[in-house]
Image (cartoon, rainbow, N blue to C red):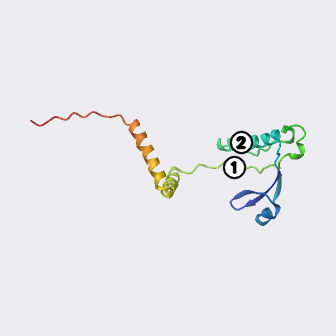
Amino acid sequence: MKFYRANTESGPRLESTQAEAKALDPNFERIDIPTDHDGLKAYVQALWDENHQLRQGGVVSVVPPVGELPEGHEEQAPAPLPTVPAPREAPYTTQAISFEDGFAAMPLALQLHYAALALENARTAIKPVKLKIEEAA
């Protein structure tokens, strides 16, 4: 299966036709993705490994080398991806603000659902205290 990778300002993007890719980036590149079970499995596993390594804070350029593909699929090896530095985690205050913005944009029913979950978690986390009330005589 042929796809075309175009580099845009927001990052690389896959397009299904040359015309779409050329409109975004005149220097697009063709990527051949195997369609048979073994070849596709090897390709997806390489993407999975790359994602895992990026989340662990590493720098990767993982595409299965031709020798690692199943026999008979050497011509279907995808083009190597550029090396990408691991993303940095946003500071806590930025995460909190982005969560608040996202929460405000949710439908009311979903907000109520999450609020109910938070209340239930708080109930289980807080130990109940028995109060002794003395009656006035």
| Badge nearest the viewer, 2 or 1 | 2
Q: Is residue 88 above or below residue 22?
A: above
The one of 90 and 116 positioned closer to us in this rendering: 116
C-alpha separation, residue under disc 2 versus residue under disc 1: 16 Å
In which quarter of the view is residue 117 placed?
top left
* Vertical order, 136 against 76 (above or below): above
Q: Secondary structure at mark 1?
A: loop
Contact flag, marks 2 and 1 (Cβ < 8 Å):
no
Q: Position of residue 48 (x, y in %)?
A: 71, 42
Q: Could you tell me which secondary element the residue under label 2 belongs to?
A: helix
Image disc number at residue 75: none
Residue at the image point whose x is 50% and y is 58% from the top: 105
- The three-letter code of the residue at mark 2 reads Trp
Vertical order, 126 against 3 (above or below):
above
Q: Earlier in the sequence, mark 2 or mark 1?
A: 2
Q: Which residue is mark 1?
A: 85
* Rendered-image quadrant of the C terminus: top left
Amino acid bearing label 1: Pro
* Residue that sits furthest to the bottom in the current view: 23
Where in the figure is residue 55, as x and y percent of width and height? 65, 43
Which residue is tagged 2? 48
**Would you place residue 120 above or below residue 13 in this image?**
above
Q: Position of residue 103 (x, y in %)?
A: 49, 54
Residue 101 placement (x, y as % from top left) = 50, 57
Q: Residues within 10 Å of mark 2 (few under 14, many from 20)?
A: few
Left or right for 123, reference 85 = left
Mark 1 Cα-neighbour bin, 10 Å: few <14, some 14–19, many ≥20: few
Direction front: furthest residue = 109
